[in-house]
Every structure is written in C-alpha cells, then in structure tokens.
Amino acid sequence: MYSAYFSGIHVANATLKSKRTFTLENQDILNIEFKAHSRSTVKYIFPINDIISIDVDKKSWQP
C-alpha cells in the first residue's frame, strides 16, 4: 500500500500488484496493476480514481 500526499495532506492510497500470468503466442505474460483512490475525506476536492494495467513479457519485461 502506498500513500499520496498533497501539500502535506494525505489525499489518496494506492496499490501495485502482479495479478496473473498467462501465455500468449508462446510468451509468458505478467499482468501488473496500479490502483489509486482518493480518501473519502478529500475525494470531492482532490479526486483520484486511477487504474493502470499493463501486460509485460516475463523474460524481457517489455510491454
């Protein structure tokens, strides 16, 4: 778990995790997901609701 601060105020929490592995065209693919969400106390003035998902080759780490 990660925390995001803006001007010293804790505004969001985030996570980074590997979700799953699968095979595509004889390559082992790893899915990595980053999620960030505003804390409920600041979500109206500093909205963050991000989900970034990327698939990378497990050997080369290239997308």
Image: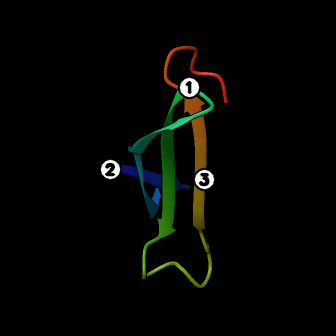
Q: Which residue is mark 2?
A: 1
Viewer-proximal residue, 39 or 56?
Answer: 56
Mark closer to the observer (2, 3): 3
Q: Where 42 falls versus 5 (above or below)?
A: below
**Closest to the observer, 51 or 31:** 31
Q: Nearer the viewer, mark 2 or mark 1?
A: 1
Residue at horizontal 59%, vertical 39%? 55
- Please state the horizontal and vertical placement of residue 57, each as a whole percent of the image: 57, 25
Residue drawn where x is 63% and y is 31% of the image: 25
Amino acid beneath label 3: Ile
**Residue shown at 59%/68% (left/top)?**
48
- Is 16 on the left-hand or right-hand side of 7? left
Camera-nearest residue between 22 and 47: 22
Looking at the image, is mark 3 or mark 1 nearer the viewer?
Answer: 1
- Residue 62, above or below 51: above
Q: Pointer 3: what residue?
A: 52
Q: Residue at x 60, y 43 (%)?
A: 54
Rendered location of residue 31, percent (x, y) = 50, 42
Tell me where residue 41 appears, x and y as whole percent: 43, 82
Outermost residue, left side: 1
Mark 1 neighbour class, 10 Å CA radius: few under 14, some 14 to 19, many 20 or more: few
